[in-house]
Amino acid sequence: MFPDLSSLETLSIRGVQWCWDALTTILQQARDVKYLFMKVEFTGNEAALRPFPEIYFVEFFNNHPKLQKFDIHGAMFAALCRENSLKKVETGFAIRCLEEVVITVRSLLNAERKNTLELLCDMSETNGDTGFTDDQ
């Protein structure tokens, strides 16, 4: 379906809607990506746009061990914020290479999403200045 993406350092996925199977295949093949930019709002097809399904926080970062910069928009962030995803975070889990996170959302952050932001900061081994502010 896609060429070998294992040697990519930078991956940018953009569009209003993508097929979920295509997204997961690309993300699985780009395991060693260092810079990931995702601006995709929906999955499904033009007849039925759907939100992203739940993405397990620990599994995602374990599958992308070299990720240094993570730039995501609302749908991907919401998928990482789901309650079951965050329950699987164990003591000692760390996102070893993550240096920068940019998250763009168009709505107010609820408590679950704020918890995910805090988790990203806490789990990053380089957790210096995050640039996050809580203005709500």
Image (cartoon, grey):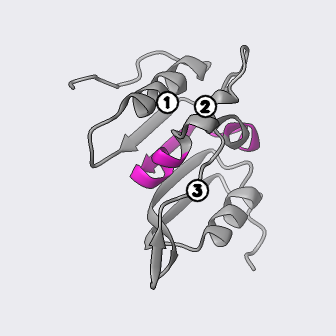
Work out how far the residue at label 3 is from the one at label 1, CA to CA, in angstroms. Answer: 16 Å
Q: Residues within 10 Å of mark 2 (few under 14, many from 20)?
A: some
The amino acid beneath tag 3 is: Pro
Query: SS of the residue at dot 1?
Result: helix
Q: Amino acid at mark 1?
A: Thr
Kind of element beneath mark 3: loop
- Pointer 2: what residue? 86
* Residue 107: image location, x then y, percent: 27, 45
Q: Residue at x 56, y 35 (%)?
A: 83
Q: Which portion, as a residue range, is magenta?
A: 61-79
Q: Crowding near pointer 1: few (<14 within 10 Å), some, many (20+)? A: many
| Disc on res. 53 | 3
Horizontal and vertical percent position of residue 36:
55, 50
Residue 89 falls left or right of residue 128: right
Q: Which residue is mark 1?
A: 116
Residue found 68% across the figure and 25% down from its top: 89
